[in-house]
Amino acid sequence: MAKPVSIEVWNPNGKYRVVSTKPMPGTRWINLLIEQDCRVEICTQKKTILSVEDIIALIGERCDGVIGQLTEDWGETLFSALSRAGGKAFSNMAVGYNNVDVSAANKYGVAVGNTPGVLTETTAELAASLSVAAARRIVEADEFMRAGLYDGWLPHLFVGNLLKGQTVGVIGAGRIGSAYARMMIEGFKMNLIYYDLYQATRLEKFVTAYGEFLKANGEQPVTWRRAASMDEVLREADVISLHPILDKTTFHLINKESLATMKKEAILVNCSRGPVVDEVALVEHLRQNPMFRVGLDVFEDEPYMKPGLSDMKNAIVVPHIASASKWTREGMATLAALNVLGKIKGYPVWSDANRVEPFLNENAPPPAACPSIVNAKALSLPVSRL
Protein backbone atom coordinates (compact mmCIF):
# COMPACT_ATOMS: atom_id res chain seq x y z
CA MET A 1 0.00 0.00 0.00
CA ALA A 2 1.35 3.43 -0.97
CA LYS A 3 2.40 5.78 1.79
CA PRO A 4 0.35 8.99 2.28
CA VAL A 5 1.66 11.99 0.36
CA SER A 6 1.58 15.49 1.84
CA ILE A 7 -0.74 17.93 0.03
CA GLU A 8 -2.00 21.49 0.11
CA VAL A 9 -5.75 21.87 -0.55
CA TRP A 10 -7.55 24.77 -2.22
CA ASN A 11 -11.36 25.02 -2.33
CA PRO A 12 -11.95 21.83 -0.31
CA ASN A 13 -15.66 21.64 -1.16
CA GLY A 14 -15.16 21.85 -4.93
CA LYS A 15 -17.16 19.50 -7.14
CA TYR A 16 -14.23 18.33 -9.29
CA ARG A 17 -10.99 16.99 -7.81
CA VAL A 18 -7.83 18.06 -9.65
CA VAL A 19 -4.38 17.00 -8.47
CA SER A 20 -1.08 18.73 -9.26
CA THR A 21 1.94 16.55 -8.61
CA LYS A 22 4.09 19.63 -7.93
CA PRO A 23 3.60 23.22 -6.78
CA MET A 24 3.65 25.39 -9.93
CA PRO A 25 4.55 29.07 -10.42
CA GLY A 26 1.87 31.71 -10.04
CA THR A 27 -1.67 31.50 -8.68
CA ARG A 28 -3.76 32.19 -11.78
CA TRP A 29 -3.90 28.50 -12.65
CA ILE A 30 -5.26 27.73 -9.18
CA ASN A 31 -7.84 30.51 -9.37
CA LEU A 32 -9.03 29.41 -12.81
CA LEU A 33 -9.69 25.91 -11.47
CA ILE A 34 -11.37 27.16 -8.29
CA GLU A 35 -13.66 29.46 -10.29
CA GLN A 36 -14.96 26.39 -12.11
CA ASP A 37 -15.76 24.53 -8.88
CA CYS A 38 -12.58 22.45 -8.66
CA ARG A 39 -11.00 21.20 -5.47
CA VAL A 40 -7.27 21.62 -6.11
CA GLU A 41 -4.78 19.38 -4.33
CA ILE A 42 -1.09 20.23 -4.71
CA CYS A 43 1.56 17.72 -3.68
CA THR A 44 4.02 19.33 -1.28
CA GLN A 45 6.16 16.23 -0.72
CA LYS A 46 9.84 17.19 -0.41
CA LYS A 47 10.85 14.92 -3.24
CA THR A 48 12.15 16.10 -6.62
CA ILE A 49 10.79 13.17 -8.66
CA LEU A 50 7.67 11.36 -7.48
CA SER A 51 7.48 7.60 -7.93
CA VAL A 52 4.58 5.84 -9.62
CA GLU A 53 3.46 4.70 -6.17
CA ASP A 54 3.47 8.30 -4.91
CA ILE A 55 1.28 9.43 -7.79
CA ILE A 56 -1.14 6.53 -7.32
CA ALA A 57 -1.52 7.65 -3.70
CA LEU A 58 -2.22 11.19 -4.91
CA ILE A 59 -4.84 9.99 -7.40
CA GLY A 60 -6.68 8.04 -4.70
CA GLU A 61 -10.17 6.64 -5.21
CA ARG A 62 -11.70 9.64 -6.98
CA CYS A 63 -9.86 12.06 -9.24
CA ASP A 64 -11.11 14.00 -12.24
CA GLY A 65 -7.74 15.06 -13.61
CA VAL A 66 -4.00 15.37 -12.94
CA ILE A 67 -1.41 18.00 -13.82
CA GLY A 68 1.97 16.28 -13.94
CA GLN A 69 5.62 16.86 -14.78
CA LEU A 70 7.97 15.56 -17.47
CA THR A 71 10.05 13.74 -14.83
CA GLU A 72 7.18 11.33 -14.11
CA ASP A 73 6.57 7.97 -15.76
CA TRP A 74 3.04 8.20 -17.14
CA GLY A 75 2.29 4.76 -18.57
CA GLU A 76 -0.14 1.88 -18.22
CA THR A 77 -0.03 1.81 -14.41
CA LEU A 78 -0.84 5.47 -13.85
CA PHE A 79 -3.43 5.81 -16.60
CA SER A 80 -5.27 2.72 -15.37
CA ALA A 81 -5.23 4.15 -11.83
CA LEU A 82 -6.54 7.50 -13.06
CA SER A 83 -9.24 5.79 -15.10
CA ARG A 84 -10.38 3.69 -12.12
CA ALA A 85 -10.67 6.94 -10.14
CA GLY A 86 -12.94 8.40 -12.83
CA GLY A 87 -10.32 10.66 -14.34
CA LYS A 88 -10.34 11.57 -18.01
CA ALA A 89 -7.63 14.23 -18.19
CA PHE A 90 -3.87 14.48 -17.70
CA SER A 91 -1.59 17.33 -18.74
CA ASN A 92 2.17 17.64 -18.69
CA MET A 93 3.40 21.06 -17.62
CA ALA A 94 5.74 20.86 -20.61
CA VAL A 95 5.67 20.98 -24.37
CA GLY A 96 7.40 17.60 -24.61
CA TYR A 97 5.73 14.36 -23.60
CA ASN A 98 8.41 11.70 -24.01
CA ASN A 99 7.52 10.60 -20.47
CA VAL A 100 3.97 9.75 -21.53
CA ASP A 101 2.77 6.50 -23.10
CA VAL A 102 0.06 8.04 -25.28
CA SER A 103 -1.17 4.64 -26.47
CA ALA A 104 -1.85 3.69 -22.83
CA ALA A 105 -3.74 6.95 -22.35
CA ASN A 106 -5.80 6.18 -25.46
CA LYS A 107 -6.59 2.73 -24.10
CA TYR A 108 -8.12 4.24 -20.97
CA GLY A 109 -9.73 7.20 -22.72
CA VAL A 110 -7.55 9.79 -20.98
CA ALA A 111 -6.83 13.05 -22.80
CA VAL A 112 -3.13 14.03 -22.71
CA GLY A 113 -2.35 17.74 -22.67
CA ASN A 114 0.88 19.63 -23.19
CA THR A 115 1.89 23.31 -23.25
CA PRO A 116 3.33 24.45 -26.61
CA GLY A 117 3.34 28.01 -27.89
CA VAL A 118 4.56 29.58 -24.66
CA LEU A 119 8.19 28.42 -24.64
CA THR A 120 9.50 29.67 -27.99
CA GLU A 121 11.23 32.92 -27.08
CA THR A 122 12.43 31.92 -23.62
CA THR A 123 14.02 28.70 -24.92
CA ALA A 124 15.65 30.59 -27.78
CA GLU A 125 16.95 33.16 -25.31
CA LEU A 126 18.67 30.48 -23.23
CA ALA A 127 20.22 28.92 -26.34
CA ALA A 128 21.52 32.37 -27.30
CA SER A 129 22.79 32.93 -23.74
CA LEU A 130 24.68 29.63 -23.76
CA SER A 131 26.14 30.51 -27.17
CA VAL A 132 27.49 33.84 -25.90
CA ALA A 133 28.66 32.40 -22.58
CA ALA A 134 30.57 29.64 -24.37
CA ALA A 135 32.06 31.98 -26.99
CA ARG A 136 33.32 34.45 -24.40
CA ARG A 137 34.19 31.83 -21.73
CA ILE A 138 32.07 33.64 -19.16
CA VAL A 139 31.59 30.73 -16.75
CA GLU A 140 35.31 29.92 -16.69
CA ALA A 141 36.14 33.59 -16.06
CA ASP A 142 33.53 33.85 -13.30
CA GLU A 143 34.97 30.81 -11.50
CA PHE A 144 38.48 32.24 -11.91
CA MET A 145 37.44 35.52 -10.24
CA ARG A 146 35.59 33.81 -7.38
CA ALA A 147 38.62 31.65 -6.68
CA GLY A 148 40.70 34.80 -6.09
CA LEU A 149 43.07 33.98 -8.96
CA TYR A 150 42.88 37.30 -10.80
CA ASP A 151 45.97 39.42 -10.10
CA GLY A 152 45.95 41.67 -13.15
CA TRP A 153 45.11 42.01 -16.85
CA LEU A 154 46.94 39.67 -19.23
CA PRO A 155 46.85 39.60 -23.07
CA HIS A 156 45.85 35.94 -23.28
CA LEU A 157 43.50 35.75 -20.30
CA PHE A 158 40.27 33.96 -21.30
CA VAL A 159 40.48 34.81 -24.97
CA GLY A 160 37.31 33.56 -26.66
CA ASN A 161 35.53 33.82 -30.00
CA LEU A 162 34.07 36.91 -31.67
CA LEU A 163 30.57 36.13 -32.97
CA LYS A 164 30.15 39.06 -35.38
CA GLY A 165 30.57 37.97 -38.97
CA GLN A 166 30.77 34.28 -38.06
CA THR A 167 28.28 31.61 -39.15
CA VAL A 168 25.53 30.31 -36.92
CA GLY A 169 24.19 26.86 -37.78
CA VAL A 170 20.70 25.76 -36.84
CA ILE A 171 19.58 22.14 -37.03
CA GLY A 172 15.80 22.18 -36.87
CA ALA A 173 14.45 25.57 -37.97
CA GLY A 174 11.01 25.35 -36.42
CA ARG A 175 9.63 28.01 -34.07
CA ILE A 176 12.41 27.80 -31.47
CA GLY A 177 15.22 27.25 -33.95
CA SER A 178 14.07 30.20 -36.06
CA ALA A 179 13.67 32.46 -33.02
CA TYR A 180 17.22 31.57 -31.93
CA ALA A 181 18.56 32.25 -35.42
CA ARG A 182 16.92 35.69 -35.52
CA MET A 183 18.46 36.59 -32.15
CA MET A 184 21.96 35.59 -33.25
CA ILE A 185 21.67 37.23 -36.68
CA GLU A 186 20.19 40.54 -35.56
CA GLY A 187 22.12 40.63 -32.27
CA PHE A 188 25.56 39.70 -33.59
CA LYS A 189 25.29 40.11 -37.37
CA MET A 190 26.03 36.42 -37.92
CA ASN A 191 25.44 34.61 -41.21
CA LEU A 192 23.05 31.65 -41.20
CA ILE A 193 23.22 28.11 -42.46
CA TYR A 194 20.35 25.85 -41.48
CA TYR A 195 19.12 22.31 -42.05
CA ASP A 196 15.48 21.32 -41.85
CA LEU A 197 13.26 18.94 -43.77
CA TYR A 198 10.99 21.91 -44.46
CA GLN A 199 11.97 25.28 -45.88
CA ALA A 200 11.98 28.06 -43.24
CA THR A 201 10.53 30.71 -45.56
CA ARG A 202 9.79 33.32 -42.90
CA LEU A 203 13.30 33.01 -41.48
CA GLU A 204 14.83 33.34 -44.93
CA LYS A 205 12.79 36.48 -45.62
CA PHE A 206 13.86 37.96 -42.28
CA VAL A 207 17.56 37.40 -42.96
CA THR A 208 17.24 38.77 -46.49
CA ALA A 209 15.48 41.91 -45.26
CA TYR A 210 18.00 42.44 -42.44
CA GLY A 211 20.87 41.96 -44.88
CA GLU A 212 19.39 44.64 -47.15
CA PHE A 213 19.01 46.97 -44.17
CA LEU A 214 22.67 46.54 -43.21
CA LYS A 215 23.82 47.07 -46.80
CA ALA A 216 21.73 50.25 -47.07
CA ASN A 217 23.53 51.56 -43.99
CA GLY A 218 26.98 50.82 -45.31
CA GLU A 219 27.54 47.59 -43.38
CA GLN A 220 28.37 44.08 -44.51
CA PRO A 221 25.07 42.29 -45.18
CA VAL A 222 24.26 39.00 -43.48
CA THR A 223 23.48 35.95 -45.60
CA TRP A 224 21.52 32.71 -45.31
CA ARG A 225 21.71 29.29 -46.88
CA ARG A 226 19.61 26.18 -46.50
CA ALA A 227 21.97 23.21 -46.31
CA ALA A 228 21.33 20.01 -48.23
CA SER A 229 22.45 17.92 -45.25
CA MET A 230 23.14 18.20 -41.55
CA ASP A 231 26.82 17.42 -42.17
CA GLU A 232 27.06 20.58 -44.25
CA VAL A 233 25.96 22.64 -41.24
CA LEU A 234 28.38 20.83 -38.94
CA ARG A 235 31.32 21.45 -41.30
CA GLU A 236 30.69 25.13 -41.96
CA ALA A 237 29.13 26.68 -38.84
CA ASP A 238 31.09 28.31 -36.02
CA VAL A 239 28.18 28.04 -33.59
CA ILE A 240 25.65 25.20 -33.90
CA SER A 241 22.37 25.03 -32.02
CA LEU A 242 20.25 21.87 -31.98
CA HIS A 243 16.46 22.15 -32.24
CA PRO A 244 15.19 18.83 -33.66
CA ILE A 245 12.41 16.65 -32.31
CA LEU A 246 13.51 13.46 -30.54
CA ASP A 247 12.71 10.24 -32.37
CA LYS A 248 14.57 7.22 -33.72
CA THR A 249 16.14 9.30 -36.47
CA THR A 250 17.54 11.97 -34.14
CA PHE A 251 18.76 9.77 -31.27
CA HIS A 252 22.52 10.40 -30.98
CA LEU A 253 22.32 12.76 -33.94
CA ILE A 254 25.52 14.23 -32.52
CA ASN A 255 28.00 11.37 -32.08
CA LYS A 256 31.70 10.64 -32.48
CA GLU A 257 31.53 10.89 -36.27
CA SER A 258 29.50 14.10 -36.43
CA LEU A 259 31.63 15.78 -33.75
CA ALA A 260 34.73 15.01 -35.82
CA THR A 261 33.10 16.88 -38.71
CA MET A 262 32.87 20.13 -36.76
CA LYS A 263 35.49 22.87 -36.55
CA LYS A 264 38.06 22.50 -33.77
CA GLU A 265 36.91 25.75 -32.15
CA ALA A 266 33.19 25.32 -32.81
CA ILE A 267 30.49 25.85 -30.20
CA LEU A 268 27.66 23.34 -29.80
CA VAL A 269 24.44 24.21 -27.95
CA ASN A 270 21.62 21.84 -27.02
CA CYS A 271 18.36 23.07 -25.50
CA SER A 272 16.21 20.47 -27.27
CA ARG A 273 16.35 16.88 -25.97
CA GLY A 274 19.25 15.24 -24.15
CA PRO A 275 19.45 11.97 -26.14
CA VAL A 276 20.04 13.93 -29.36
CA VAL A 277 23.67 14.05 -28.18
CA ASP A 278 25.87 11.02 -27.44
CA GLU A 279 27.23 12.35 -24.17
CA VAL A 280 30.03 9.80 -23.84
CA ALA A 281 31.36 10.77 -27.27
CA LEU A 282 30.95 14.44 -26.39
CA VAL A 283 33.02 14.13 -23.20
CA GLU A 284 35.85 12.49 -25.13
CA HIS A 285 35.68 15.17 -27.84
CA LEU A 286 35.81 17.95 -25.26
CA ARG A 287 38.79 16.29 -23.62
CA GLN A 288 40.71 16.01 -26.89
CA ASN A 289 39.71 19.46 -28.20
CA PRO A 290 40.06 22.04 -25.41
CA MET A 291 39.01 24.94 -27.67
CA PHE A 292 35.76 23.20 -28.64
CA ARG A 293 32.97 24.37 -26.35
CA VAL A 294 29.50 23.23 -25.51
CA GLY A 295 26.44 24.62 -23.72
CA LEU A 296 23.92 22.05 -22.50
CA ASP A 297 20.51 22.53 -20.89
CA VAL A 298 19.40 18.89 -21.33
CA PHE A 299 21.12 15.56 -20.75
CA GLU A 300 20.97 12.03 -22.04
CA ASP A 301 20.14 10.43 -18.67
CA GLU A 302 18.60 13.43 -16.95
CA PRO A 303 19.00 14.39 -14.14
CA TYR A 304 22.41 12.69 -14.36
CA MET A 305 25.41 13.60 -16.51
CA LYS A 306 27.76 11.10 -18.08
CA PRO A 307 31.04 10.63 -16.17
CA GLY A 308 33.58 13.35 -16.88
CA LEU A 309 31.22 15.98 -18.26
CA SER A 310 31.14 18.04 -15.08
CA ASP A 311 34.96 18.14 -15.07
CA MET A 312 35.18 19.74 -18.52
CA LYS A 313 36.10 23.44 -18.31
CA ASN A 314 34.95 23.86 -21.91
CA ALA A 315 31.41 22.72 -21.07
CA ILE A 316 28.64 24.91 -19.64
CA VAL A 317 25.91 22.82 -18.03
CA VAL A 318 22.63 24.15 -16.63
CA PRO A 319 19.72 22.16 -15.11
CA HIS A 320 16.99 22.17 -17.80
CA ILE A 321 16.05 25.83 -17.35
CA ALA A 322 15.25 26.81 -20.95
CA SER A 323 11.65 27.59 -20.04
CA ALA A 324 12.51 29.11 -16.67
CA SER A 325 11.33 32.66 -17.12
CA LYS A 326 8.56 33.80 -14.80
CA TRP A 327 6.11 34.60 -17.60
CA THR A 328 6.71 31.30 -19.37
CA ARG A 329 6.50 29.02 -16.35
CA GLU A 330 3.34 30.73 -15.11
CA GLY A 331 1.93 30.41 -18.62
CA MET A 332 2.80 26.71 -18.75
CA ALA A 333 1.00 26.17 -15.43
CA THR A 334 -2.07 28.01 -16.75
CA LEU A 335 -2.17 26.03 -20.00
CA ALA A 336 -1.74 22.70 -18.20
CA ALA A 337 -4.55 23.55 -15.79
CA LEU A 338 -6.84 24.64 -18.63
CA ASN A 339 -6.15 21.41 -20.53
CA VAL A 340 -7.42 19.42 -17.55
CA LEU A 341 -10.28 21.80 -16.80
CA GLY A 342 -11.40 21.84 -20.43
CA LYS A 343 -11.68 18.05 -20.61
CA ILE A 344 -13.54 17.91 -17.28
CA LYS A 345 -16.03 20.52 -18.51
CA GLY A 346 -16.45 18.90 -21.91
CA TYR A 347 -14.90 21.78 -23.87
CA PRO A 348 -13.61 21.24 -27.41
CA VAL A 349 -9.91 21.34 -28.31
CA TRP A 350 -8.39 24.67 -29.42
CA SER A 351 -7.75 24.64 -33.17
CA ASP A 352 -4.16 25.99 -33.02
CA ALA A 353 -2.09 24.78 -30.08
CA ASN A 354 0.64 27.33 -30.77
CA ARG A 355 -1.71 30.34 -30.65
CA VAL A 356 -2.00 30.55 -26.88
CA GLU A 357 -2.29 34.31 -26.28
CA PRO A 358 -6.08 34.19 -25.61
CA PHE A 359 -5.45 31.75 -22.74
CA LEU A 360 -2.71 33.89 -21.21
CA ASN A 361 -4.52 37.23 -21.27
CA GLU A 362 -5.12 37.95 -17.59
CA ASN A 363 -7.59 40.74 -18.38
CA ALA A 364 -10.17 38.44 -19.97
CA PRO A 365 -11.61 34.98 -19.29
CA PRO A 366 -9.82 32.22 -21.23
CA PRO A 367 -11.61 30.60 -24.18
CA ALA A 368 -13.87 27.64 -23.37
CA ALA A 369 -11.46 25.16 -24.93
CA CYS A 370 -8.56 22.81 -24.12
CA PRO A 371 -5.39 24.63 -25.28
CA SER A 372 -3.55 21.50 -26.50
CA ILE A 373 -4.52 17.80 -26.40
CA VAL A 374 -1.98 15.62 -28.21
CA ASN A 375 -4.29 12.61 -28.58
CA ALA A 376 -7.42 14.57 -29.50
CA LYS A 377 -7.74 12.80 -32.86
CA ALA A 378 -7.33 9.33 -31.33
CA LEU A 379 -10.07 10.10 -28.80
CA SER A 380 -12.28 11.76 -31.46
CA LEU A 381 -12.51 14.98 -29.43
CA PRO A 382 -14.29 17.91 -31.07
CA VAL A 383 -12.28 20.91 -32.29
CA SER A 384 -13.21 24.43 -31.19
CA ARG A 385 -14.68 26.80 -33.79
CA LEU A 386 -13.78 29.84 -31.68
Image (cartoon, helix red, strand yellow):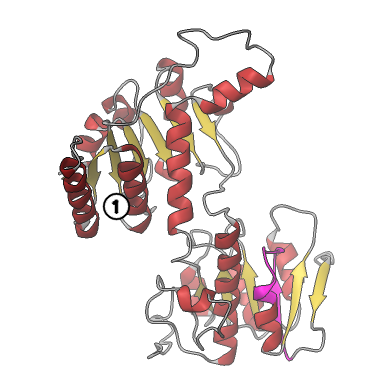
- Pinpoint residue 74: horizontal percent, then vertical percent: 58, 65
Q: Which residue is mark 1?
A: 173
Q: Residue at x 54, y 9 (%)?
A: 153
Q: Is residue 293 above or below residue 91?
A: above
Instruction: Check the image and report above or below for 63 versus 272.
Output: below
Closer to the camera, 385 or 78?
Answer: 385
* Residue 309 seen in the current view: yes
Confirm whether the magenta stretch covers residue 375: no
Image point (62%, 22%), residue name: 143
Q: Residue 137 appears at what percent x and percent y?
A: 49, 24
Task: Describe the element under mark 1 as helix, strand or loop.
Answer: loop
Q: In the image shown, does 34 or 57 lie closer to the viewer? A: 34
Near mark 1 (Cα within 10 A), the count class, few <14, some 14-19 or many ≥20, is: many
Q: Position of residue 11 (x, y in %)?
A: 79, 83
- Position of 280 with respect to 37 (left or right) is left
Q: Is residue 285 left or right of residue 369?
A: left
Q: Which residues are magenta?
A: 15-30
When asked about the image quadrant of residue 61, the answer is: bottom right
